[in-house]
Image: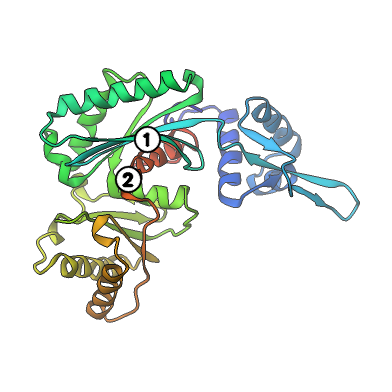
């Protein structure tokens, strides 16, 4: 389960992934339910889940997980052990590097924030590597317990890295880290990672969503989920045409929210970053966006907080390396 998605994975591994993702989306499931929903025989499900229980991926018989059936037999529900694997996450911004460790549920087990203003790109990568190694050592983590590390990059910090579009910068970031970090590495934009964290760690099941991330100054970073998949536009330059919208920062955010509401018709638009901390600002941007769009828009504050942006990296790592969901276009 520690390898990023591979289209040539064997049938047994694929079946286990189907079981994990079914439990992930539907909560605790019985073997009979898994068999009917996935389309695998009950005997095969029993053998597979027995291996997964032995490997510590699943647990059974938790409190409240025994259901009385008509014939008097009890149905045992299976759940994923959130601590069976851990993920490192890192967020690179223009001011701070945040590094942390979480379980599959998004519980932040440890994190640190480092001021990187004026520090060279290579030095930032060195800090990231050293902190990850220190956390591994301090927590006595074995390699088979670690999924990998997810690294998210804020748009405002993209100038740290040479390259053309955002996709090229993310590819170089991954390549540069691979020389030092000997665990799977996943890279993404911060806004995309925040959307994955919203869904994976905070139970948001929207299929079409937009997230606007902004600190206390432009630019406003955009993340989009289309049919449940992250989308970053051509060459990773999502939203670049809309960042020149004039007006105050709140007016720009409202205009962008209204534009994306008209283009994509998302179920929800999430606002993330220090600029949206105050309830009055959240309300103001929401009201302006509704007025511009001329129709209702559901706008909410994103769950992930600025001091915990490493969870965006943890989320993309868990989704890609544990559940092996496709993250194309992040």
- Which residue is drawn at the image coordinates 29% and 21% (left, top)? 130
List the residue tagged with mark 2: 307
Quadrant assignment, res 50: top right
Q: Is residue 131 visible to us here? A: yes
Q: How is the image coloured?
A: rainbow
List x then y, in percent, for residue 168. 18, 36
Q: Which comes sooner in the sequence, label 1 or label 2? A: 1
List x then y, in percent, for residue 243. 13, 59
List x then y, in percent, for residue 31. 73, 42
List the residue tagged with mark 1: 111
Point out which mark residue 131 bears. none
Residue sitting nearer the eye, 156 or 11: 156
- Which residue is drawn at the image coordinates 68% and 44% (left, top)? 34
Q: Is residue 222 left or right of residue 8?
A: left
Which quarter of the image is occupied by the C terminus? top left
- Disc 2 is placed on an element classified as helix
């Amino acid at each position: 389960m520690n390898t990023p998605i591979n289209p040539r994975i064997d049938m047994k591994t694929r079946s286990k992934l189907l079981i994990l993702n079914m439990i992930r989306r539907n909560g605790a499931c019985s073997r009979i339910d898994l068999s009917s929903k996935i389309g695998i025989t009950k005997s095969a499900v029993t053998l597979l889940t027995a291996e997964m229980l032995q490997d510590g991926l699943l647990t059974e018989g938790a409190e409240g997980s025994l259901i009385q059936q008509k014939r008097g037999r009890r149905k045992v529900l299976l759940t994923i052990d959130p601590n069976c694997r851990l993920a490192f996450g890192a967020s690179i911004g223009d001011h701070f590097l945040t590094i942390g460790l979480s379980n599959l549920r998004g519980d932040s087990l440890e994190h640190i924030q480092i001021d990187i203003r004026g520090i060279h790109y290579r030095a930032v990568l060195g800090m990231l590597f050293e902190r990850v190694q220190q956390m591994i050592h301090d927590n006595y983590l074995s390699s088979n317990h670690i999924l990998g590390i997810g690294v998210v990059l804020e748009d405002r910090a993209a100038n740290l890295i040479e390259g053309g579009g955002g996709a090229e910068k993310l590819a170089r970031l991954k390549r540069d880290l691979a020389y030092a970090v000997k665990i799977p590495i996943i890279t993404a934009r911060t806004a995309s990672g925040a959307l994955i964290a919203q869904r994976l760690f905070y139970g948001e099941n929207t299929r079409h969503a937009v997230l606007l991330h902004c600190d206390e100054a432009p630019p406003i970073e955009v993340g989009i989920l289309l049919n449940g998949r992250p989308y970053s536009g051509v060459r990773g330059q999502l939203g670049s045409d809309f960042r020149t919208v004039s007006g105050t920062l709140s007016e720009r955010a409202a205009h962008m929210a209204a534009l994306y509401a008209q283009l994509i018709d998302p179920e929800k638009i999430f606002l993330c970053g220090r600029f949206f901390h105050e309830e009055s600002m959240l309300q103001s941007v929401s009201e302006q966006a509704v007025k511009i769009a001329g129709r209702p828009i559901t706008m909410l504050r994103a769950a992930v907080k600025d001091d915990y942006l490493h969870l965006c990296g943890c989320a993309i790592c868990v989704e890609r390396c544990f559940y092996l969901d496709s993250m194309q276009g992040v």
